[in-house]
Amino acid sequence: MSLPRAHKADICLLLEGTFPYVSGGVSSWVNQIIRGFPEYTFACCFVGSRPQDYGAMKYELPDNVVHLEVHYLHDFDHNVEKRPMRGDRKMYETVSRFHGAIKRGEVSAERNQLFSDMVGELGDKGRLSEQSFLHSRASWDFITDNYRAHSRDPSFVDYFWTVRIMHAPIWTLNDIAENLIPARVYHTISTGYAGFLGAMLKRRTGKPLLLSEHGIYTKERKIDLFQSEWIRDNRSLVEKNNAEMAYFREKWVNFFTELGRECYQASDRIVALYERNRERQMDDGAPPDRTMNIPNGINLPRMQQVRAARGDAIPPVACLIGRVVPIKDIKTFLRAMRTVANAMPEAQGWIAGPEDEDPEYAKECHGLIASLGLEKNVKFLGFQKIDELLPKVGVIVLSSISEALPLVLLEGFAAGVPAVSTDVGSCRQLIEGLGEEDEALGAAGAVVGIADPEALGHEVVRLLSDGDWWQRAQQAGIRRVESYYTQEMMFDAYRRLYRTLMQEAR
């Protein structure tokens, strides 16, 4: 399939591992935003890990997407000439000063200038080219000096390859920034590598950079890194201290933290979905005067039609809508269904979402169903159309260990489905309300602690078996969405942002 190409666009979206190759969540929001602004042309720059990690597009591209390009950061098939060279020691002294500012936690004009100086030297003819990083004596000396001065791990080999693998994508991002079509506004939908690309584009072009952060990227990567098995921990059993992070995990966490900090410093506006995340952004280095909150919004007329398709009875179905991955904690949902099935043998637990992102975890979940004796009560449905699914559901369940402001709860509320959720992200705000007027609308379900399947199961049973409570929760959810979380409210806020940034760019 040929990708659309253009010479320029109004808005260029920088997308890491999302639209159009991954379904649900942030990708749904991106699709919604593009379709909500037909007056603008969009370019989409997709940045992923490796080609084999993604299948075909999950979304049909809207007509106003005039350009799409796809890049992979960990596809190491490209060849860099293996030619030894001396390298520029003064340039690596600049890198050293930049690292010193990072270690001191310093955010200053000097640090920003050092970053700009380095970005300007990353090209093939620059003093910080990929060839120089991989094969110069100056780079070797820089890495070995830092190992001697700072490493807490005894393995130099692991240190050396961690540094190389960690930094290799930067030169791919630089190539993207050099060749990406011009846009009036660059809009990154996360920090991380896409956000760092945005910072590079800002330094190169001077065009406005807008950051919309759904979940806090560094927090989510920290969770992933804690769970990862590919990062070496060379400590012996005697040396291990569970209160201390393994050295190489800490290096990766710090790396992504600094990518985020550079994106925050370069961004003209920084959008969070709710206040707690805005505060987290500021803690991580976002300038307070550039931050703001714009909550997600849903297509209310569409979801009202879905609600109209519901019958009068409460379906004895608890449904988790999401990817089958550890961060969604599917296993807690499955254990909660054992509690539900004990109280309501006829109850069903549905998992509606793709299983291909982490096949090993999905396999473990299927095995857990068998060990819990839930073969008759639990079904994996794969990806489902929300309009067809929600009329058959009695309660939406979210068992995640990390979320931002999940669209699935808002869509469920508008479709007349109460929710039970773990206390993550803005879920308590969505279910119980925020502020006096919002709280007066009532609770749209229940909130429980993370990884507490018994509490989760009891609240599901309570909703499904108590018709009066279910009706009150349903009405509270409908009123909350209509009052605070409509698509029109979100579009109005972003329309003002786009117009303001384009005017400032002139």
Image: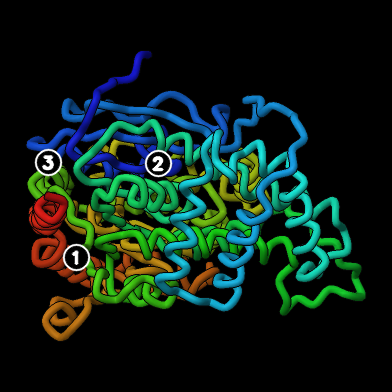
Q: Residue 57, how many percent across, how many down?
A: 38, 26
Which residue, given by chain and number where applicable, does mark 1 sit on? 477
Q: Residue 59, how many percent across, how many down?
A: 31, 30
Question: On residue 404, which mark appears?
Answer: none
Q: Earlier in the sequence, mark 1 or mark 2?
A: 2
Could you tell me if the residues under marks 3 and 2 are in contact, i.e. CB atoms within 8 Å?
no
Could you tell me if the residues under marks 1 and 3 are in contact, i.e. CB atoms within 8 Å?
no
Does 362 sit above or below residue 98?
Answer: above
Residue at the far bottom: name it: 436
Which residue is found at the position 43% from the left and 69% from the top?
422
Which residue, given by chain and number where applicable, does mark 2 sit on? 18
Q: Residue 399, how many percent across, how many down?
A: 46, 62
Which residue is found at the position 16% from the left and 61% from the top?
485
Circle 1: element type: helix
Which residue, given by chain and number where applicable, does mark 3 sit on? 37
Instruction: Give the amino acid type for the residue marked by disc 3 in the picture.
Output: Phe
User: Is 7 on the left-hand or right-hand side of 214?
Assistant: left
Which residue is found at the position 43% from the left and 24% from the top?
56
Instruction: Give the amino acid type for the residue marked by disc 2 in the picture.
Output: Thr
